[in-house]
Amino acid sequence: MALADDIERAAGLAAEAAGEGGDVVSGVIATEPQPGARVYLCSFDGADGFRSWLAVREDGSAVESRVELREAVSIAALCEVAADAAGGGDLDTLISSLERLRLAEAPEGIELAEEAARALRDVVGEPPRLATPALLDEIGAATRRLERELDPTGGSPFAAALKSAQDAVAELQRELEAGYRVELT
């Protein structure tokens, strides 16, 4: 089953688990914080303008463990930040710029930088994507390869972006927990 189909199914499971009330599932983020333990973070928009959340497992059961919820939220947020920060955030533009530079000036090593940028674009992929620790590692490794091709002695803007994302991760966790539809243990 394709991830888009899984997400659609999870939205239906979340709506069933949430019960009546007129709230609409407005978004689903697929995560797998542990291998084989898929969790879907589902947002609901209410008629009153209030957003609430419910995380459901593949079997449709609601996540009631604060630890399990935080693991899913953390990997979702970190993968999103990583995908957004990879290669400066716009890989297609970067690849086009590298191609133009190669054609105009042909600096040594430009082909390797282009190859690394394309490989990174392949790893990041298009949404929807399944947020996993392995994906985060793959994005990090591909980004570091690109950074080294572009500037072998430079630091890692990507690593800095992930470090600064900790506040955003904590804020997202607070938002989900504050508007969570079931009591967490």
Image: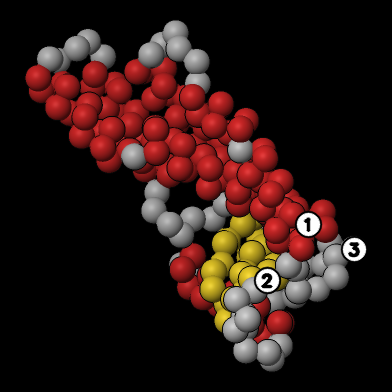
Q: Which residue is mark 2?
A: 52
Q: Nearer the viewer, mark 2 or mark 3?
A: 2
Compared with residue 93, is residue 46 higher up or lower down, i.e. above or below? below
Is residue 72 left or right of 108 when viewed as pictured?
A: right
Q: Residues within 10 Å of mark 2 (few under 14, many from 20)?
A: many
Q: Which element is circle 2 on?
A: strand
Is residue 169 left or right of 69 when viewed as pictured?
A: left
Q: Amino acid at mark 1?
A: Glu
Q: CA distance from mark 1 to mark 3?
A: 10 Å
Q: Residue at 36% of width from left, 35% of height from top?
A: 119
Where, by quadrant of the figure, is residue 135 drawn? top right
For the residues labelled 2 and 3, say whether their Cβ atoms are less than 8 Å apart: no
Q: Residues within 10 Å of mark 1 (few under 14, many from 20)?
A: some
Q: Nearer the viewer, mark 1 or mark 2?
A: 2
For the residues labelled 1 and 3, say whether their Cβ atoms are less than 8 Å apart: no
Is residue 3 left or right of 167 when viewed as pictured?
A: left
Q: Which residue is mark 1?
A: 68
> Which of pointers 1 and 2 lies earlier in the amino acid sequence?
2
> Which of pointers 2 and 3 lies earlier in the amino acid sequence?
2
Q: Identify the mark at residue 104; answer none if there is no mark.
A: none
Q: Position of residue 142 (x, y in %)?
A: 45, 31
Where, by quadrant of the figure, is residue 15 drawn? bottom right
Q: Nearer the viewer, mark 1 or mark 3?
A: 3
Q: Residues within 10 Å of mark 3 (few under 14, many from 20)?
A: few
Q: Which residue is mark 3?
A: 185
Q: CA distance from mark 2 to mark 3?
A: 18 Å
Determine the residue located farthest toward the front in the rendered image. Answer: 48
Q: Position of residue 143 (x, y in %)?
A: 45, 30
Compared with residue 88, is residue 16 higher up or lower down, i.e. above or below? below
For the residues labelled 1 and 2, say whether their Cβ atoms are less than 8 Å apart: no
Q: Position of residue 109 (x, y in %)?
A: 26, 14
